[in-house]
Image: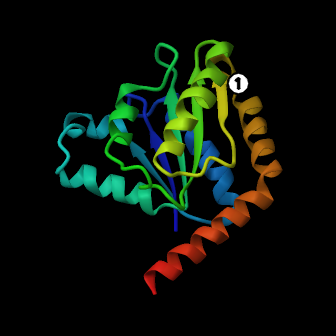
């Protein structure tokens, strides 16, 4: 059982990954699970090599996670091609039982909801992930105010604490039943 941060930013160590890490840490504080970060920038050169062992291992780690925080900057009103190429390696129900939290960093307020709710959330639903915890979307300006960002993420997690616990308990039960 784990929480995986999946950063679709083509730059390693981006603000996108940092915000996603904060979201993952807020969830981890509720369910006490370890957090692992996957920077897709690290595997970009092999992204279109389906049999690559590192890429296969990353996809399997995401599919085994209890919660996956899927983060992307907004690129031309959508998620990054890097993230899309990674997600395309999954079949229709590959993330069944995984709770995904879409996180978007956008340049303008109009792209926050567009990318998070209209583009990224349906993509994750398509591969079987549950997006029942909702999306988090921020403008670049909101991300630069560290205190306000931390407060927003903490309030988001606090409001969802019962649901986070319930989803995590369901994933533990489901995984245990499969293993038996």
Q: Quadrant of residue 105?
A: top right
User: Who's the residue at 66% across and 14% down the image?
Assistant: 110
- Which of the pair 117/69 is nearer the observer? 117
Residue 19 visible in the current orientation: no
State the count of labels: 1
Q: Is residue 111 left or right of residue 48?
A: right
Horizontal relation, residue 117 to residue 71: left or right? right
Residue at the spot x=52%, y=68% of the render? 1
- In the rendered image, the vertical position of residue 20 relative to residue 99, given as above or below: above
Q: Position of residue 2 (x, y in %)?
A: 52, 63
Q: Is residue 29 in sight in this rendering? A: yes
Q: Residue at x 32, y 34 (%)?
A: 85
Which x, y percent locates residue 120?
A: 53, 33
Residue 123 in percent (x, y) is at: 49, 37
Task: Note whether 98 is above or below 42 in the view shown.
Answer: below
Describe the element under mark 1 as helix, strand or loop. Answer: loop
Q: Residue furthest bottom?
A: 180
**Residue occupying image coordinates x 24% and y 38%:** 47
> On the rendered structure, is 53 left or right of 2?
left
User: To which residue does mark 1 refer?
Assistant: 145
Left or right side of 76 for 143 = right
């Amino acid at each position: 059982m784990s929480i995986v941060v999946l950063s679709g930013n083509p730059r390693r160590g981006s603000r996108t990954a940092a915000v996603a890490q904060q979201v993952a840490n807020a969830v981890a504080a509720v369910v006490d699970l370890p957090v692992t970060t996957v920077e897709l920038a690290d595997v970009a050169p092999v992204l279109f090599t389906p049999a690559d062992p590192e890429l296969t291992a990353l996809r399997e780690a995401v599919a085994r996670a209890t919660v996956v925080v899927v983060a992307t900057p907004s690129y031309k009103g959508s998620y990054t091609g890097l993230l899309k190429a990674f997600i395309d390696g999954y079949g229709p129900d590959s993330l069944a039982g995984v709770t995904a939290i879409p996180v978007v960093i956008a340049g303008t307020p109009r792209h926050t909801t567009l990318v998070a709710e209209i583009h990224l959330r349906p993509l994750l639903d398509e591969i079987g992930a549950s997006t029942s915890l909702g999306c988090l979307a921020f403008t670049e300006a909101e991300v630069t105010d560290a205190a306000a960002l931390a407060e927003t993420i903490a309030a988001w997690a606090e409001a969802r604490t019962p649901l986070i616990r319930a989803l995590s308990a369901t994933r533990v039960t489901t995984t245990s039943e499969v293993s038996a």
